[in-house]
């Protein structure tokens, strides 16, 4: 289960609206390498993960990603609050506005709706951890791309925090992969799927 | 900004800092469960965090349901600003 904590993991205080940037940053809410996909990926993968350390990493990073999704949502909300119709039209935000007004909805920057197809839960620890490490790097690249587009220090600051967390998570998933491999045959890591074959050998 | 708001923000900032230390060392401990220094660090920051959450609830209202058990006559949980409202000053 989860309990809500009534604060952001890292503060978001943006005083200047910028609907154009909101349309870009929303990709880290509902886009292919966004925080929603990250959280759902890890929280889905953990059930069949046979090693307690790695189940812990998937649970705790999956939980932190929910807090990152909340930060991104707060950024998008603060960049679009109290917009006038003139500002909506001038910024190109009208295409989002027509379906969602100023409500938050998970989509990629290009308007593609959030889809579970952007992540995998393969039921194989080695496969899933390679996906997770790639996912952290893809999210880091996306934040790098966002940082090239924005100059407002009030937006840059929380985005830089989120970018740094991708690197820490990549490191933890790398350690997780090493823990998985230590349980496997070092001559052939792929001889079995420890989440499916020989279930009793890995407890 | 009034002095009360200033001290509220200061305490919230402290809670953010010690909580982040807990968030970060938590992940490290998952993959290094026997690291004694990390365990001691976790214990220290976790205690600082819990004390600060209690203090915040007493002075300004609860940030967690577990600290929402005051003697107030109304439900304080919804009276605190939501965190996306510009750090709570809206």
Image (spheres, coloured by chain):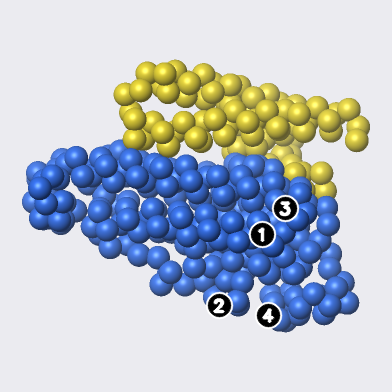
Chain colours: A blue, B yellow
- Mark 3 chain: A
* Category of crowding for the residue at label 4, using alpha-carbon neighbours closer than 10 angstroms: few (below 14), some (14–19), many (at least 20): few
- Quote the CA–CA distance across marks 2 and 4: 13 Å
Q: Residues within 10 Å of mark 2 (few under 14, many from 20)?
A: few
Residue where numbered disc 4 is placed: A99
Neighbourhood count class around disc 1 (C-alpha, 10 Å): few under 14, some 14–19, many 20 upward: few
The answer to whether any part of residue A159 appears in the image is yes
1 or 3: tag closer to the N-terminus: 1
Please tell me which of labels 2 and 4 falls first in the chain.
4
The earlier-in-sequence mark between 4 and 1 is 4
Q: Closer to the N terminus: mark 3 or mark 2?
A: 2
Dot 2 and dot 4 within a common chain:
yes
Give the Cα distance between marks 4 and 3.
25 Å
> Which element type, helix, strand or loop, lies under badge 3?
helix
Circle on res. A148: 1
Across and down, in percent, residue B77 comes to: 68, 42
Q: Which one is in front in this view, the residue at disc 4 or the one at disc 3? A: 3
- Indicate the position of residue A105 as horizontal and vertical percent values: 62, 69
- On the image, the x and y values in percent for residue B62 come to 67, 35
Judging from the image, mark 4 belongs to the subunit labelled: A
Q: Which residue is mark 3?
A: A155
**Placement of B71 over or under A30, stated as above or below:** above
Point 36% across, 35% down: residue: B30
* Left or right for B38, reference B83: left
Cα separation, mark 1 vs mark 2, equals 22 Å
Marks 4/1 in contact by CB < 8 Å: the verdict is no
Q: Is the residue marked by circle 3 packed among few (<14), some (14-19), or many (20+) residues within 10 Å?
A: many
Q: Of the residues tagged 1 and 2, which is closer to the observer?
A: 1
Same chain? Circles 3 and 2: yes
Measured along the vertical axis of the image, is residue A58 above or below residue B42?
A: below
Q: Nearer the viewer, mark 2 or mark 4?
A: 2
For image coordinates 61% across by 72% down, the residue present is A109
């Amino acid at each position: 289960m989860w309990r809500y904590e009534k604060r952001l993991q890292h503060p978001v205080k943006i005083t200047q609206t910028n609907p154009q940037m909101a349309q870009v940053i929303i990709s880290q809410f509902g886009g292919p390498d966004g925080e929603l996909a990250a959280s759902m990926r890890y929280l889905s993968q953990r059930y069949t993960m046979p090693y307690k350390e790695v189940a812990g990493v998937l649970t705790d990073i999956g939980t932190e990603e929910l807090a990152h999704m909340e930060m991104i949502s707060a950024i998008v909300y603060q960049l679009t609050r109290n917009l006038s119709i003139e500002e909506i039209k001038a910024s190109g935000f009208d295409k989002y506005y027509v379906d969602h007004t100023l409500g938050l909805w998970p989509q990629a920057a290009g308007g593609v709706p959030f889809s579970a197809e952007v992540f995998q839960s393969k039921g194989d620890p080695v496969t899933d951890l390679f996906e997770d490490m790639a996912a952290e790097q893809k999210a880091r690249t996306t934040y790098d791309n966002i940082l090239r587009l924005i100059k407002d220090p009030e937006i840059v600051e929380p985005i830089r925090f989120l970018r740094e967390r991708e690197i820490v998570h990549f490191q933890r998933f790398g350690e997780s992969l090493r823990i998985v491999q230590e349980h496997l045959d070092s001559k052939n890591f792929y001889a079995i799927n420890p989440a499916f074959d020989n279930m009793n050998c890995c407890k | 900004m009034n002095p009360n708001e200033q001290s509220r923000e200061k305490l919230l900032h402290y809670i953010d800092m010690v909580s982040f230390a807990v968030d970060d060392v938590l992940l490290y401990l998952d993959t290094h469960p026997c690291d004694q220094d990390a365990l001691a660090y976790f214990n220290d920051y976790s205690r600082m965090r819990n004390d600060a959450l209690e203090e915040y609830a007493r002075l300004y209202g609860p940030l967690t349901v577990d600290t929402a058990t005051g003697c107030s006559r109304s439900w304080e949980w919804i009276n605190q600003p939501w965190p996306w409202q510009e750090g709570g000053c809206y």
